[in-house]
Amino acid sequence: MMKAVLVNKDSTLTVGDIEKPSLDEINNVLVKVNYSGLCGSDIPRVFEEGAHFYPIVLGHEFSGVVESVGSNVAKYKAGDKVCCVPLKPCFDCPECQQGLYSLCKNYTFIGSRRQGGNAEYVAIPESTVYKLPEYVNLKQGAFFEPITVSLHGMLLCGGCQDKNVIILGVGTIGLLALQAAKAMGARNVIAIDLNNERLKLAKELGANIVINSGEMSPEEIFNVLNEYRFGQLILETAGVPQTVKLAIKIAGPRAQISLIGTLHKDLSLTYGEFGQILRKELEIKGSWMNYSAPYPGKEWDLAAEFFGKGQIEIEPLIQHCGNVHSYSEEVSSLNGKPMNGKILLSFEEK
């Protein structure tokens, strides 16, 4: 038996003893979990009956050490430090054949459609395992999945080299994107948010300019950005209609807009707002998940590179790191609201 955090249909979290998974498939890897992060996408699964089944063990942002491997696994061995690549594409559909793994329609997903990493052990397919370099620690490994989400959106727009990168929303994804943009050679990085504490942290992490969008009109923000109006890459990471509309309003000529945040409310554009897309000749790119060819993609190798060079700080992004009991209490206290920082489950904490 092993400890796990179970999410129930009534939005409660319980710490329970469940059966330790066995390697009943020859291509599976058994991982002893060290850290598992709460993703913003997990919040509806907890509080809005958004999971595929209940009770469920969530957790797709996790790292750990390989305990054992199936008889058909050659790439990994016991003792390897790894993190989870939670999407398992089918590899057979037309999208997968084109290397568009994020767009696979026949996928399964660790921590959503099958048991995740909020347990002491998890058995996952070999293809959903990423070996961490020796210079990356396990806590950093739990941040590979969220940082690759931002990296995917940047790479779809050709990267950040010599661009004025504007980040709308500096939660965990936005703050990771900020640091990644600098590592990728951005000319300037501008952070925009409503929360002054987050903006202060963004400044400490290297933002050239921070702007509180609650204290300035879109027209005023546009004017502030005037000297940075060319070569803009705008990353929308907040996932709310207001920031998508703001991106269009503050964009400079031929700006790129990468839509990374997931909306949970309807977005309506006026004809004038739509007209700005045309008149500014904006390039709007949708970004879904974090995978490319060869699987799992350049995103994951870049994450390893940036951590190895000390270009990504994670400690200031962590709101809470605790054992199964304190983690459950911290998540429950959200009551459906967004996190202020990353909430981590640690099996190193007693």
Image: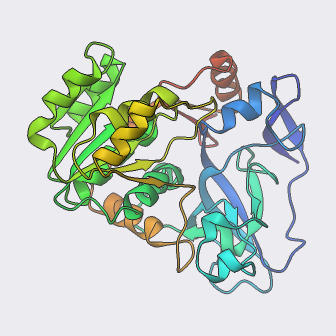
Q: Nearer the viewer, residue 310 or 252?
A: 252
In the image, taking residue 87 as reference, residue 249 lies left or right, namely left
Where residue 45 appears, as percent x and y from the top left, is 75, 35
166 over 169 or under it: above or below: below
Report the number of numbered marks: 0
> Does residue 171 appear in the picture of this structure?
no
Please state the horizontal and vertical placement of residue 201, each as a whole percent of the image: 28, 29
Residue 337 visible from this viewpoint: yes
The quadrant holding residue 265 is: top right
What is the quadrant of residue 248 in the picture? top left
The reply, left or right, for residue 239 in relation to residue 62 is left
Question: Residue at 30% across / 17% down in the picture?
Answer: 196
Q: Residue at x 59, y 36 (%)?
A: 263
In the rendered image, the vertical position of residue 153 relative to residue 80, given as above or below: above
**Residue 157 place in picture, x, y as percent:** 36, 61
Closer to the camera in the image, 280 or 315: 280
Instruction: Tell me which corner region of the image, top left, top right, bottom left or bottom right, holds residue 171.
Output: top left
- What residue lies at 13% left-to-right and 43% top-to-bottom? 228
